[in-house]
Image (spheres, helix red, strand yellow):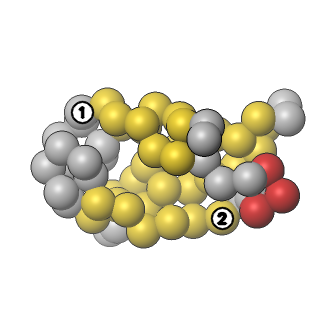
Amino acid sequence: MDVYPVTCPTCFELFDVPLPAPEETPCEVDYDCEICCRPMVIHFNEEFGEVVADARGIHD
């Protein structure tokens, strides 16, 4: 399983999230930080043939 590092928008800790298949992007996933457990939304997109992730707080 491929993973991608994201930074929590609340505690700013870095952790890895599993990536969806490229054909499932773009998409959004509700996710809780693995460090502080605060909710966030992770946006998955395809760039240059690879899936990338960007985490944002739920109120951003």
Report which residue position mark 2 lands on.
27
Left or right: 23 with respect to 29? right
Per the image, label 2 sits on a secondary structure element best described as strand
Per the image, label 1 sits on a secondary structure element best described as loop
Task: Residue type at mark 1: give it.
Answer: Glu
Question: Would residue 35 be visible to someone looking at this image?
Answer: yes
Q: Give the image location of residue 17, x and y in percent.
A: 46, 44
Q: Which mark is residue 13?
A: 1
CA distance for labels 1 and 2: 23 Å
Q: Give the image location of residue 47, x and y in percent.
A: 78, 37
51 to 37, vertically: above or below: above
User: Quadrant location of residue 11?
Assistant: top left
The answer to which of 34 and 60 lies nearer the viewer is 34
Task: Residue type at mark 2: give it.
Answer: Cys
Residue beneath the point at 31% across and 31% down:
14
Kindly check if marks 1 and 2 are in contact, taking CB atoms under 8 A apart as contact: no
User: Quadrant location of residue 53?
Assistant: top right
The crowding category of the residue bearing disc 2, from other C-alpha atoms within 10 Å (few below 14, some 14 to 19, many at least 20), is few
